[in-house]
Amino acid sequence: MLFVPFVVPPLVFFLAAITGLAAVPMTCWDAASEFNDSANPDAANPSGLWSAGWKLNLTGKFFLATTASNDLPHASGWATSSGVPQVAHNTHPVPVTVNTNPIIIPPRALVLHPGPDGSYAVLRFTVPTDGAYKVSGQFYALDDNAAGTTTDVWILPNEDKSKAFSARVDYKAGAKMASFTSRMFQLKKGDTLDFEVGYGGNKNYEYDSTGLAAIIEKVK
């Protein structure tokens, strides 16, 4: 089955832990570890700076996913009422096998699955303060069944394609991952970074489960 070599580094939180000290702003975020999926006791979407949702097209209106998507005890997340697009999460510290395909989801990993008719699965980060933000990680194929994962993947700042990261993931063609090491974005408070997965050039959303590992750092 699919081997995913990317290992998400430990997330460093810059939070004051001693009474009497002023809180130091957080400057690093981990998409997977901060994902508040539908199985959590405090399940919420949006949660913190993250929102799971979908778009009818790449730069279209963002819709919040309000339906709990559960494949318990293995994975849970948020989806449309039809089930896709979907943003889900392996809730365990070990790999799990889900669906009848099946697919293997790495420990604590995020999965984005697009919908039919060109709709995108979207994980949105809302920028907390003005500054330069470095984004590192990768999208990666999770499905090796039939045609395998064949998706178009994006990091879209404020719906601006001219400044976006874009790539394709195509398992059978050898493009099993799309890395985005140290991509820089100059952003203002309230801006958005959208991690998006579409159904790719074959225009078929089946077998398109795509993993996402992403660390965001405010560098100045």
Image (spheres, rainbow, N blue to C red):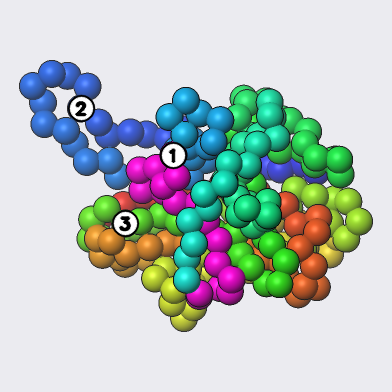
Q: Nearer the viewer, residue 207 or 21?
A: 207
Q: Position of residue 174 (x, y in %)?
A: 81, 61
Please name which of the two marks, 2 or 1, marks the residue nearer to the observer.
1
Mark 3–mark 2 distance (CA, rounded to whole Å): 21 Å
Neighbour tally class for label 2: few under 14, some 14-19, many 20 plus, Cα within 10 Å? few
User: Quadrant location of the C terminus?
Assistant: bottom left
Q: Residue 44 shows which numbered tag?
A: 1
Q: Secondary structure at mark 3?
A: loop
Determine the image quadrant of residue 207: bottom right
Query: Bounds of the magenta span?
Result: 44-60
Quick one: which residue is furthest to the bottom in this view? 162
Residue 50: x and y in percent read: 42, 48
Q: Nearer the viewer, residue 220 or 141?
A: 141
In the image, is residue 121 above or below residue 41? Answer: below
Dominant SS in magenta: loop
Q: Which residue is mark 2?
A: 16
Q: Quadrant of residue 15?
A: top left
Crowding at label 3, few (<14), some or many (≥20) Cα neighbours within 10 Å? some
- Left or right placement of residue 146 versus residue 155 in this view: right
Please state which of the two labelled residues, at mark 3 or mark 1, is closer to the viewer. 1
Residue linked to disc 3: 127
Mark seen at residue 25: none
Identify the amino acid type marked 1.
Answer: Ala
Q: What is the three-letter code of the residue carrying label 2?
A: Ala
Name the residue at 47% across, 25% down: 41
